[in-house]
Image (tube, rainbow, N blue to C red):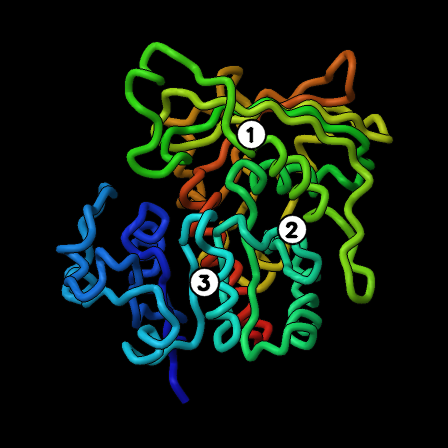
Amino acid sequence: MRLKREVAILGATGTVGQRFIQLLQGHPWFEISVLAASERSARKKYREACKWRLETAMPEEIGDMTVVNTNLKEVQQAGDVDFVFSALPGSIAGPIEREFASEYPIVSKASAHRMEGDVPLIIPEVNPEHLQLISIQKKRRGWNGFISTDPNCSTIQLAITLKALMKFGVKKVIVSTMQALSGAGYPGVPSLDIIDNVVPYISGEEEKMENETRKILGTFYGEEIQPANITISASCHRVNVKDGHLEAVYVELEQKPTVEEVKETFREFVGEPQRLKLPTAPERPIIVREETDRPQPRFDRDAGKGMSVVVGRVRRDPIMTIKYLCLGHNTIRGAAGAGILSAELMFKKGLL
């Protein structure tokens, strides 16, 4: 019996693909076997095809691997593959991921399939039961594999905190984001647009936060997800920060908990990844800071190795019920780390 599952990464030269490579080094269950990217990168050594953008060094063995085209046949010929991580741009991911799903399980960071009715949109601590959609999807589509998706980076940290608050009955949510530059990919926002500035619009971001959150917090009924009956209003903004999305969140609750009860609920929140002790799972999904000026991206984005959501300034709100700030590392918890944690959960459940 093989000890590790062999992984292919689609979009391996991009910033999210690089983060997958970084986080998978030394992983106890998964091993990278194939790197795939666009035609201009294919047939080159990874170190020649990729402009490495992370602070840690490119792993030597990864640099020696030959990149193949993002094509099912080429990936199959390049090595043994048990499942696939997709870090493809959303604009091209749709048909490519469907082709691969005919043969392989795919854990996708792309937005192309997130809102499809039979595709799970997973945050492992929040809605692991939605993985039951996989058997329905495979039967409907006649695939050997399947597609499971990870939410938008700004959605993930919001939904984790709202899941904790659902014990009090979440009715309405207003969220205003301050999103890091790395969320736009490389090269991201032109320097003259963001220096000495805040850009008050990110295309499609507000709709993703509003719609994805309701699906994630929804209830699985037999063969479909019934979206949560929560009204969500989002306003999204790009700020001059490298990594770490900060969100100001206002929540109307059915009950009227005290501020201390809300903080304790955040602190006590755990999910299936913590109970199963999955390798990438943070010990505490939500960390509460008591300082009046925290969380801050520079100081708090790496909490829990970048997998924890940091909450602070929890207080009563005169219009809603409660308000707080939450911070998440957008390329770790919000991107590659989320995909790896989802894959670990699927592995533990026998889906990979």
Q: Where is residue 277 in the image (x, y as percent from the top left)?
A: 53, 62
Q: Is mark 2 on a helix, strand or loop?
A: loop
Badge 3 marks a residue whose secondary structure is helix
Q: Earlier in the sequence, mark 1 or mark 3?
A: 3
Q: Distance between the residues labelled 2 and 1?
A: 24 Å
Where does label 1 land, which residue? Answer: 326
Residue drawn at x 52%, y 75% is: 102
Q: Nearest the camera: 196 or 334?
A: 196
- Verify CB contact (< 8 Å) between mark 2 and mark 1: no
Nearer to us of marks 1 and 3 is: 3
Q: Earlier in the sequence, mark 2 or mark 1?
A: 2
- Can residue 225 be spotted in the picture? yes
Placement of 314 over or under 210, stated as above or below = above
74 relative position to 222: left or right: left
Point out residue 168 in the picture as x, y percentages from the top left corner: 81, 36
Query: Compared with residue 280, is residue 6 higher up or lower down, i.e. above or below?
Result: below
Q: Which of 83 and 31 is in front in this view?
A: 83
Name the amino acid type tagged 2: Met
**Which residue is at 70% across, 57% downward?**
117
Q: Which mark is residue 303?
A: none
* Among numbered discs 3 and 2, the one appearing first in the sequence: 3
Looking at the image, residue 23 sits to the left or right of residue 318; the answer is left
Assess disc 3: are there few (<14), some (14-19) or many (≥20) residues with their C-alpha within 10 Å of its C-alpha. Answer: some
Look at label 3 and name its amino acid. Ile
Q: What is the CA distance from the residue labelled 1 to the residue labelled 3?
A: 34 Å
**Secondary structure of residue under mark 1:** strand
> How far separated are the C-alphas under marks 3 and 2?
17 Å
Residue lying at 41% horizontally and 29% vertically, measured from the top left: 180
Q: Mark 2 points at which residue?
A: 115
Q: Residues within 10 Å of mark 1 (few under 14, many from 20)?
A: many
Q: Name the residue under label 3.
A: 96
Looking at the picture, how far across and down is residue 42, in whole percent?
A: 22, 63
